[in-house]
Amino acid sequence: MTTVQTSESNEMAIEQDSYRYLPLDSILTPDEIAAAPYAVRILIENVARRAPASLGTVLARFRGETTECELPFHPNRVMLHDTTCLPALADFAAMRDSVAELGGDPGALQPSIPVDLTVDHSVIAEEYGTPDALTANLNIDFRRNSERYRFIKWAERSVSNFGVIPPGTGIIHQVNMESLATAVWVDRSTEPPTLHPDVLVATDSHTPMINSIGIVGWGVGGLQGQAAMLGEPVTIQYPTVVGVRLTGRLRSGVTGTDLALTLTELLRAHGVIDKFVEFHGDGALDLGWADRAAVSNMAPEYGATCALFPTDEQTLRFLELSGRSAEHCRIVRTYLDAQRMMCHPGSPAPTYDENLELDLAEVEPSLAGPRMPHERVALGDVPASFRGAAPAPSTDGGVDPVFGQKIPHGPIAIAAITSCTNTANPTLMVQAGLLAQRAAAAGLTSKPWVKTSLSPGSKVVTEYLSEAGLLASFEQLGFYTVGFGCMTCIGNSGPLHPRMEELVDDGVVPTAVLSGNRNFPGRVNPRLGLGYLASPPLVVAYALAGNILHDFDTDPLGHRADGTAVYLRDLWPSDTEVADIVAASVRPDMFRKNTAAIRTGTAEWRELSGQSAIRFDWDDRSTYIRRPTYLTGLGAEPSPTVTITGARALLVLGDNVTTDHISPAGAIQPNSAAAEYLRGFGVRPRDFNQYSTRRSNHEVMIRGAFTNPAVRNRLLPTEVGGPGGWAYTADRSRVVPVFDAAPSYREAGIPLVILAGKNYGAGSSRDWAAKSQALLGVRAVVAESFERIHRSNLIGMGILPVQFGDGDTVTDHPLDGTETLSFDGLDRLEVGMNRLTLRITHADGTEKSVPVRLRLDTRNEIAYLRHNGTLPYVVRKALAHSTTGRPTTGRHS
């Protein structure tokens, strides 16, 4: 329930209705409001309304009277998707068991704020290129995942404040923008109703897409999301805000994707990890809502916590277009204007901590690759970037017997229009559709080795494409709709063309081109080490070319029946043509119709049943849903101290170790330890499914830890071990996969440490990247730097995120695995950079002391470490406050 200080709240009238609100000008002076970034205005209102005891400290930091402070942020809602929600629900059920086993009331453990689950991460693009691909893939999804979905049905019956957007509906971030976000929250549990900014967190790193319409929200790990569900604040350090002034306009033919990739390169180079980014200037005001969405969506790729475009007339136009009521749009305008949280032309720019500038006229057509999202490459330079990553083969394969054509160097194995980043953008989708229409009219086709797919983030997309007559044009080139979900962008790409699978085994190096947000090696497909991010129209163009080395300026995409060459420039539609079709085909009634049905689901979904008891009845034979071992046998009190002595290094790794490297999301390979485990339960290979869909079974997930082929343990000689992470056993008698090595240390009572370089834990927000390390016995990770969400997740699992000192690197301290590692200084934990000493004792008895720092941002994080993780902390807190009643918080209306 919203907390409002009555003495500091006012009422406003909107039409005939009265509303309460907490005036920002009762907290800040007019000059202070004008100087505050818009994100900071929203944060200060949140603290004043929900955590007034902390307001003085936050204002002191705002006014420059202190340099550090915690900011307790209380979201009014939480969003999850299925690969984070299912393990969160397993944790939730296990926490109820723990509360009951310790003598408390398990029914008292309920979310205190609304929680929405969007099931969008499970469907796989197995079938493609046919009219029934959508139905076939959804049928496969239900066959494989019905047990998981019945578990969700249990949550619907047993967990209050919990709603579901079923499979086959859309992608979490697009659903949020189109249907769930309110911009201003109307809390009708008070009388009169209370207005405040709509603020949220979600367990996906691309949550900042919602920042494009003025809403402050960001991605958190599953552990932090669970704590927020139960009323814990999401506590952050008061943010550094980077102002990015945009000037000018995008040139004709330059897309929102090109801008997003350009800003990703710019901001990653500047350094915005853990910072808020706020866009302003005439160029920002002129930028449409859909292009803003692409820019904000990429926030985790440039490292920012938030990427805010303040609410303005563009935002209100989107709210109207997406079917929000006229009454609610009036509430948004009136409230935000009263609070000076709405940006108008001519408004003075706030005062930012750091400043950057970009002239939109300088943005050029671009891709990103071949390995990282911030590796922006001008379209004309793409061939050179690929050649630098994959030298040409020494032999010419000739005409392929299956395809009847010569397979070029750098064949496109996957061309996917996918993800929340770009399928939310009508301009981009219509551009791609018109390009496909013109290509089909010219007699061009996609190359036969290219796996083509269309997986929109919302059914609204296929409706307006169909209205414009463009869906059929996509299909003529093989871009049939394969599902409504993340799919290829998160690795649910399914197998390649069977012949391409053989060619990869023969040494051919193919690549993927997708309209997504990540291209880490092996992420899109385990057979593909290289990939490029591109706008939807360029995805279509590359499917026609079939080759990443294609030069679009000089090489034709094909020929008409009369022999006339067809170039990309001949197919590219004009901005005016695109704008006219968008205006005629994208209507509010489409959004209203979609929003009205988002919780209905298919007949298969409606027919599923589930348990209804407060405590979930675990099945010991289940290969999907198991009670996690880290929530068994909890004591009522935590250990009195945090200590790590006599540890050993399990892995020493390099830079840019992503959460994909640590805990995979893609297909479970037949020769893997996870597959061997599943076979033991009688699971057939066709139903091994993805790691992402089995995250509620710790036995599967721990077997996948560090199995990514790109992982290389620097403790081992180059010639020792196989693909993925291998390690010495505790007695150093063998080198085996990490999953087999870790138990030998646990049996010997030896804690483990991982050492790494820069940006440890980059990428997805998945909490299993931390959970798997905890289950392996890892107590600390020592790295040169951490990505934001993973650092939080490590603490959430009781693992210490320790950083080397400035200028110190992992390579400065060569290890061979025989050393013991101990940490001095853990007896005095405090918020900030805790100075510790890492003592490295070599086998010959010599000792080296390395100054390191344990970064703790909040007092809550200290509490989580002392309790060995967020979940034990929550269990003990729930136990202490356990009553026979249940917390209830009504949804807004």
Image (cartoon, rainbow, N blue to C red):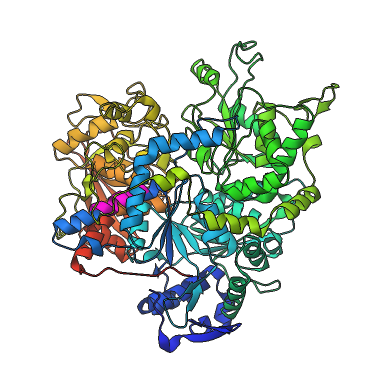
Q: Residue lying farthest bottom? A: 7
Let me know if residue 88 is in the magenta part.
Answer: yes
Determine which quarter of the picture holds residue 665.
Answer: top left
Residue 887 visible: yes
Percent of width and height locating residue 668: 38, 30
Q: How many marks?
A: 0
Please state the horizontal and vertical placement of residue 388, each as a whole percent of the image.
59, 28
Please say if 54 is above or below 500: below
Above or below: residue 862 compared with residue 447: below
Residue at 78% x, 31% y: name it: 441
Which one is nearer the viewer's eye here, 546 or 755? 546
Residue at 50% across, 35% down: 137
Q: Residue 548 in the image: x percent, y percent?
A: 64, 29
Position of 47 with respect to 317 (left or right) is left
Q: What type of secondary structure mainly makes up the magenta span?
A: helix
Give yes or no for residue 418 being in the magenta stretch: no
From the viewer's side, name the closer residue of 284 and 376: 284
The vertical placement of 570 against 336, above or below, is above
Between 472 and 412, which is closer to the camera in this rendering?
472
Residue numbers of the magenta segment: 86-94
Q: In the picture, residue 657 is in which quadrant? A: top left
